[in-house]
């Protein structure tokens, strides 16, 4: 009986982690829809985690206010820095957003109010696993609506060819900034939920390696639809558990799986499924395939 | 005191330049960020440690073998992670992820072969252990050696790119790959050479950094990738003199931060300088303005 409870407890944690990673992957994905590679999610996740934790610990606020505060702060910061940062393209944007996340981490590391390197302890554990699932479900629904909306099509158009999109009258700068803010709010809420799930946060959790892992989830799953990042995050969170018998060799299997999917399946996992189920093949992803970026803009 | 700090910054800048010149070479031609560069750097350090500590080799044979091996890893990296994507013109996102996957694999293999602990180099195998005293400035010979090696290699690299046939092919590919191909440039051969050179330089940096700090571990490549990207953006993507200048600037910014503020802020210095740069002149100090703005 004890073993069974322990099994269920660890399974519960795994399900929570998969859902959380799926949310983070979606926050990277909304920027990728517009063809923008932003790795700022870790920074916004940290902002969300610290904001809601401090609002509850020091401000004595209820959990809901903590969540709102986290989302609002992250969204405002994103709107403020979005315009200058999003003038940059491709890898320049990627590295600048990494720099942003790193600066947030340094701030948390060196500001005593935020607990410094020791992190924050004693965060009220108010997150239930179903909160995270509900949040993910709402996001999937919103992405479903986005796909068929004017705004979603505009993002796709920017992703395909920004200059052409601009020529067609799409206010590219404003749309990109809005997508950046949406991505920030998504990541910040994920950070809050994670902080209140685990009782303790430290700056080390929000590092560069985590940021690129989230990007891997999205690309591994496929960038054609929002199911790709969700599926990729779930698959790669569960993969190490499935290959537990390989023990120390697990990271190699992880690396090899990612390599094989990226090399051989341009559509990611979702593309792979579509190949296996006849009749579901649709247009290729506008982000992952096709155009050589080098000649895109000058 | 100030002179000592300047020397420290110069030798730190020499590491950054060695490491980043390979990154910038690859970026200049292929427009990709190679996230496995740090893993190759780490392999250089650990392999030289293995040859010296476990096989009883001297510093120079160990350096030579490690650097050649890094060059070979570079070719394998290109074949596994970049060439298949290049063949289908996959854009810049998939190569980022595939090189990261290779980096996972390289780090894990290093854990298997060399263990996960931080290793120390045998003191008798390392040359240049003395210090040079100039007035009140103390110069560890190893720092001097590194700076000399770095200057020589940067000149060799510059010579290769500007004066040799391979270099001409590399510059042609930077300019326009399709036209270069039509003009008879053997694209795949040139790219293979470029990966050999870039990875060998990362190997040199790894060996010297490992010996200088007397430590190496499978995880030492993590932070330097990030620093390397900051360096090449600051200097201008694809520019080798830019990598040297960027490396020196970041090293000086970090040293100044440590001296005048606090060592806590050292790692933030690179990004503050970088972001300021990007907002003022996004193409970097010595870069062309290609592809930066819409």
Image (cartoon, grey):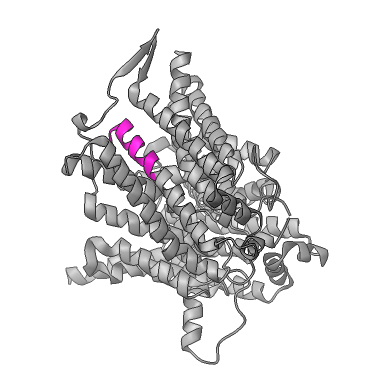
Nearer the observer, A19 or A287: A287
Nearer the observer, A59 or B239: B239
Above or below for B60 versus A89: above
**Would residue A122 be visible to someone looking at this image?**
no
Q: Quadrant of the C terminus of chain B?
A: bottom right
**Would residue B210 be visible to someone looking at this image?**
yes
Question: Whole-percent x and y of residue B115?
Answer: 22, 49
Nearer the observer, A105 or B121: B121
Q: Residue at x 39, y 37 (%)?
A: A117
Q: Residue at x 29, y 25 (%)?
A: B128
Question: Whole-percent x and y of residue A127?
Answer: 43, 59
Is residue B255 inside the magenta stretch? no
Residue at the far bottom in the pictured view = A279
Magenta portion: prevailing SS class: helix
Q: Residue at x 35, y 36 (%)?
A: B209
Is residue B207 inside the magenta stretch? yes
Q: Magenta residues?
A: B203-215
Quarter where residue A171 is shown: bottom right
Question: Whole-percent x and y of residue B83?
Answer: 49, 65
Quarter where residue A90 is shown: bottom right
Question: Whole-percent x and y of residue A204?
Answer: 40, 45
């Amino acid at each position: 009986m004890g073993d069974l409870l322990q099994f269920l407890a660890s399974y519960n944690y795994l399900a929570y982690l998969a859902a959380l990673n799926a949310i983070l992957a979606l926050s990277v994905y909304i920027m990728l829809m517009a063809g923008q590679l932003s790795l700022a999610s870790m920074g916004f996740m940290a902002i969300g985690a610290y904001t809601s934790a401090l609002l509850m610990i020091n401000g004595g606020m209820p959990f809901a206010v903590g969540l709102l505060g986290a989302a609002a702060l992250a969204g405002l910061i994103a709107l403020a820095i979005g315009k200058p940062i999003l003038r940059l393209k491709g890898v320049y944007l990627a590295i600048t957003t990494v720099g942003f996340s790193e600066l947030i981490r340094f701030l948390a590391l060196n500001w005593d109010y935020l607990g410094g390197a020791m992190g924050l302890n004693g965060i009220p554990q108010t997150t239930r696993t179903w909160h995270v699932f509900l949040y993910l479900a709402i996001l999937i629904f919103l992405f479903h609506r986005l796909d068929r909306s004017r705004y979603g099509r505009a993002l796709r158009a920017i992703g395909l060819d920004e200059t052409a999109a601009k020529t067609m009258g799409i206010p590219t700068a404003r749309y990109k900034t809005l997508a950046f803010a949406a991505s920030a709010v998504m990541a910040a809420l994920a950070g809050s939920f994670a902080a209140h799930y685990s009782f303790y946060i430290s700056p080390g959790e929000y590092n560069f390696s985590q940021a690129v892992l989230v990007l891997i989830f999205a690309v591994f799953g496929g960038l054609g639809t929002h199911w790709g990042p969700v599926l990729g995050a779930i698959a790669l969170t569960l993969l190490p558990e499935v290959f537990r018998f390989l023990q120390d060799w697990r990271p190699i299997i992880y690396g090899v799986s990612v390599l094989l999917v990226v090399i051989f399946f341009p559509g990611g996992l979702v593309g792979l499924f579509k190949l296996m189920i006849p009749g579901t093949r649709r247009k290729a992803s506008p982000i992952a395939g096709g155009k050589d970026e080098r000649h895109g803009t000058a | 005191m100030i002179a000592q700090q300047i020397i420290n910054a110069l030798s730190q800048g020499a590491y950054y330049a060695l490491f980043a010149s390979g990154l910038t070479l690859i970026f200049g031609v292929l427009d990709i960020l190679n996230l496995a560069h740090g893993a190759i750097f780490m392999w250089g350090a650990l392999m030289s440690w293995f040859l010296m500590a476990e096989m009883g080799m001297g510093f120079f044979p160990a350096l030579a073998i490690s650097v050649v091996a890094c060059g070979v890893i570079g070719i394998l990296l290109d074949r596994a992670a970049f060439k298949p994507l290049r063949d289908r013109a996959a854009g810049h996102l998939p190569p980022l992820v595939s090189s990261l996957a290779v980096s996972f694999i390289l780090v894990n293999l290093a854990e298997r072969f060399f263990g996960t602990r931080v290793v120390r180099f045998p003191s008798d195998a390392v040359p240049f252990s003395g210090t040079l005293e100039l007035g009140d400035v103390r110069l560890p010979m190893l720092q001097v050696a590194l700076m000399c090696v770095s200057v020589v290699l940067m000149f060799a690299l510059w010579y290769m790119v500007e004066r040799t046939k391979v270099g001409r092919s590399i510059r042609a590919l930077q300019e326009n790959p399709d036209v270069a191909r039509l003009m008879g440039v053997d694209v795949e051969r040139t790219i293979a050479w470029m990966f050999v050179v870039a990875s060998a330089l990362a190997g040199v940096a790894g060996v010297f950094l490992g010996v200088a700090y007397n430590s190496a571990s499978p995880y030492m490549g993590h932070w330097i990738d990030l620093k390397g990207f900051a360096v090449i953006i600051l200097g201008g993507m694809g520019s080798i003199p830019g990598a040297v200048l960027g490396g020196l600037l970041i090293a000086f910014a970090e040293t100044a931060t440590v001296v005048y503020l606090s060592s806590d802020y050292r790692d933030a210095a690179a990004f503050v300088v970088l972001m300021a740069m990007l907002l003022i002149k996004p193409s970097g100090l010595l870069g062309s303005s290609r592809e930066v703005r819409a």
